Amino acid sequence: MQTIQTLIFMTSSLFDLTGKRALITGGTQGIGEGIARGLAEAGATVLINARNKEKMDACITRFLDAGIKAEGFVFDITQPGAVRKSIDDIEAGSGPIDILVNNAGIIKRSPAEDMEEDDWNEVINTNLTAPFSVSKYVGRYMIRRQSGKIINICSLMSELGRDTVAAYAAAKGGLKMLTRNLATEWAHHNIQVNGIGPGYIATPINTSYREPGNPLNEYILSRTPAGRWGTPQDLAGAAVFLASAASDFVNGQIIYVDGGLISTFGKPFEK
């Protein structure tokens, strides 16, 4: 009979990322930084991508000061040539990318009838085409090694519509289906491709929305069964699971970390 200590060891080893290397795009703040910290706490070395060198350097300094093994790489994920060169350089000079988190993204809000095609294209290129490009070039190395984990950061808008975010919702819905298609194509190479769909997550870019009395804040709190905004740390557990051996037979799935929002019409009425 297995002892409790043996079971504990087996369980913890399932989620152990020691020796693994994880590339997180747009990992200098918010959701990306929270996921990077979670992967690092599980033992991974985190490779942070950003377009802004100052933000990246500041993030790497925070990580190193916290005892986190981290490296920084500046390249624009919307430029396929730069993506290919950067991935080749990382693999050749730094080491293999075992885990990829496609996190970087943007949003441009506009009524559909007023949205400029240039804005539409920028959102689609950043949130959908770029994850394809990064996955393509990282995936080639994963196929050679017959091993890899890819995590796409999807959204509630992968499932639900909302006014003024047509381009964002189209991109995130596409990212959900890209996740499932890559999982289908690459599963026989022992590559698992899954997604995380964050709910409303408290980050520096939405501080003003979370002020008491703000209609959006009141709506989110009333619409989310958990009754609160999520935090970047709330996403860490799902990311570690999808990056680890614990998810070796999980493929093409989207885990919604949203306090129950997508599962319900709204919070239960108080009795």
Image (cartoon, helix red, strand yellow):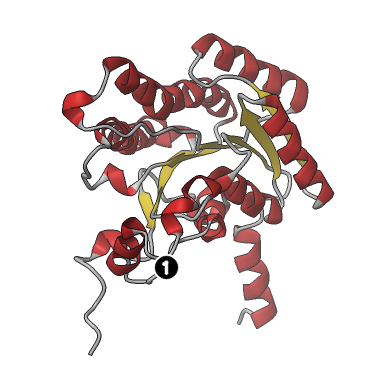
Asked if residue 203 is positioned above or below residue 118 in the image, the reply reads below
Percent across and percent down for residue 93 are 76, 20
User: Percent position (x, y) of residue 92?
Assistant: 72, 19
Q: Taking 49 as reference, is 198 above or below it?
A: below
Q: Residue at x 70, y 25 (%)?
A: 53
Q: Is residue 162 left or right of residue 125?
A: left
Residue holding disc 1? 228
The quadrant of the image that shows the C terminus is bottom left
Seen at 63% across and 54% down, the residue is 38
Looking at the image, which residue sits at the far left? 113
Quarter residue 161 falls in? top left
The quadrant where residue 260 appears = bottom left
Secondary structure category for the residue under label 1? loop
Q: Amino acid at mark 1?
A: Arg
91 is higher (above) or lower (below) than 184: above
**In the rendering, at what x and y percent does residue 257 appear?**
41, 58
Quadrant in which the N terminus is drawn: bottom right
Asked whether residue 163 is in view, the answer is: yes
Tell whether 260 sits left or right of 31.
Answer: left
> Which residue is located at x 22 percent, y 45 percent?
162
Q: Position of residue 101 (x, y in %)?
A: 53, 38
Task: Name the residue at the front extreme.
Answer: 213
